[in-house]
Amino acid sequence: MARFRSEFYTTAQLARRVRVSESRARAWYSDGKLPPPDGRDADKRPLWAATTIDAWCRRTGRVPADDALWLWRPEAEASRPAPVLFHGITEIKQEGKRYGVHAVLWDTPHGHVVALTPLADEPAPDIDRQPLAAATLIAPVFWPDAIVALQLGAEYGADDEIQMQVFSLEPAHDRNAAAPHEETRNALLGGRSEHPSLDAATLVQPTARFHGMVTAEDLARVIGAPVPVWPSGTCTASAIRRAQAARPAAHTLIVPSTADGWQAEQDQLEAAVKHGLAEEFPAAFTVLATDLRDTLERARRERADRPARGTGWYLAAQPALPELPWSAEQFLRTAGQLSLKQAADDFRRLRSIEPDLPASAAEGAIYERAMLLLRARLRVALPELAVDDVEYYAGEWDGPIVELWRQSMTSVDGAAAVLTATRRGKRLADHGDLDHLVGLWRDTAGRYVAVFDTDLVGNPPSFIAEWPYAPPAGWTEQTVIAADENTGAVLAITPQESGEQRIEPVPFDPGTGPSFRHGYGGGSPYTLYQALIRAVHGTITAPFNLNDIPFTGHEQHDAPQRSMLWHAIATTKGPLRLPWPQVQQWARQDAVKAGYQAQ
């Protein structure tokens, strides 16, 4: 298995790399003379990638570090275009499967340069494998001097600077051991353009060492020619074949406009007409048609604003300007104005129909897309309707509170069949593994909870639940908010007059979303805090957040003086048990501190 290494430098390490004192480097940073940092450590101190430092050295006339990539050396600048040894699709093996990657290989006096782009119309290998595609083109003896630039699905607008990830290849064994493969280099020098048969997995396994980002201009400087850049969705096998035929000119191909993503929406609108959506659900048809029009206009603007070339690069391909067929134009003309009442009616009806459609129903995807667009339109005018939705939420199926929850639900017979028969079931099943399905339950509100076991020894089963966003109702003075230790299920337990207990999920806050935990001061406890604040105040989303509550520099973030509710969530170890009246009191205290006044 290939290793994916990266290295970043602190200010002190940067100083050593550029051969100055640490105090000088810190002064440069304070004066804004150093390049912007690539990241920061846990203490917010700046960090730089090696290429960022070395590129800055080249721009400012400083001598690069001894271990800098050769492309930063002044003598690496090309006086004429480097020979192109390969231009096409190479293959890399991963877990028994072969994946195609587009590659251009240049041979410079200082080493090979390889530009890689994953294919848009085929599955891509894992990102840590993609740089190793270069190893299939170069004999191992030449790996240490190779520079690999990887382009990953970027969008290119008016910005002239194109950046790529840059790697080097480091053999796992002595580089001289690869000498018998010299014939590979000779074959490439002979101009071979078909798929190489050499597989890196059969040779000395290299390491792809990540150095940072490199611009197309930097690569062009050492290869003596502009670098081909593929906008997202354009690097397909057919486009590559056309590009090969157009060599050696730096020519921009015009490819089908499906690469802009609007064709799928047009097909969906035509299917909506076929299935009678315009007559049966006029508001749903309107939002589909309007969305297609907006997507079409956006694609045309982006295409018009995208330059075909810039400093050190040219577009290898770009989508044709989108054009609608006459039938689609008619669809857009017939779409009426959106009626709020009709939109709400259509949304309710679609929501009642779509989940129970057969999983293979042709109209299912159309209905789902229409509901998504209608919900977005209703979010402001009818937020209580739009928020009535579920999240597919995973957690541990373990602990006494989870067991109470299971006992309150109804077991569903034929679980595997249920999860494959309807669109609702399939959506739930897509979040788990049916081969590990333990069972399926339905809670008191009719929501599904599927349980899956695991191959990991000692780990409990996990659940995938339809977890609600709709605000709670029916919680009383006897309700308790409860969770087991180290589980994601937070439940409200409310005793009933019958002597039974109603056990239901604490709804997520739409503003923060799907993850609950307690016992520490992280993001998942924060989402639980926001969910309880929202439940107390009965709003669509939490009316304020924890950061709205001031605290002095002498207090800890989770100090009780700041928020008793947050303190209880963040510091409770073991099981969580919060009486609802206490939660209400704490939440109202926090509202006063945050300056929130209920309407």
Image: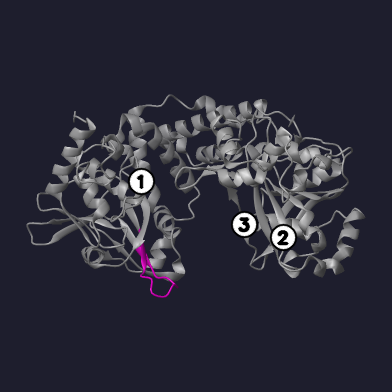
Q: Residue furthest right?
A: 190
- Numbered disc in front, either 2 or 1: 2
- State left or right for residue 53 relative to residue 185: left
Mark-to-mark CA distance, 3 and 2? 10 Å
Q: Earlier in the sequence, mark 3 or mark 2?
A: 3
The residue where tag 1 is placed is: 513
Secondary element type, mark 1: loop
**At 71% across and 45% down in the image, what residue appears?**
235
The residue at which mark 3 appears reads as 5
* Percent coordinates x, y for residue 299 in the rendering: 61, 31
Give x and y (percent) for residue 441: 30, 64
- In this rendering, position of residue 1 left or right of residue 171: left
Do tag 3 and tag 2 residues touch (Cβ < 8 Å)?
A: no
Q: Is residue 463 visible?
A: yes
Marks 2 & 1, CB-CB < 8 Å contact: no
What is the quadrant of residue 168 in the picture? bottom right
Q: Which residues are magenta?
A: 450-464
Q: What residue is shown with label 2? A: 170
Residue 162, by quadrant, is: top right
Q: What crowding class fits label 2: few (fewer than 14 Cα within 10 Å), some (14-19), or many (20 or more)?
A: many
Q: Is residue 579 above or below residue 76?
A: below
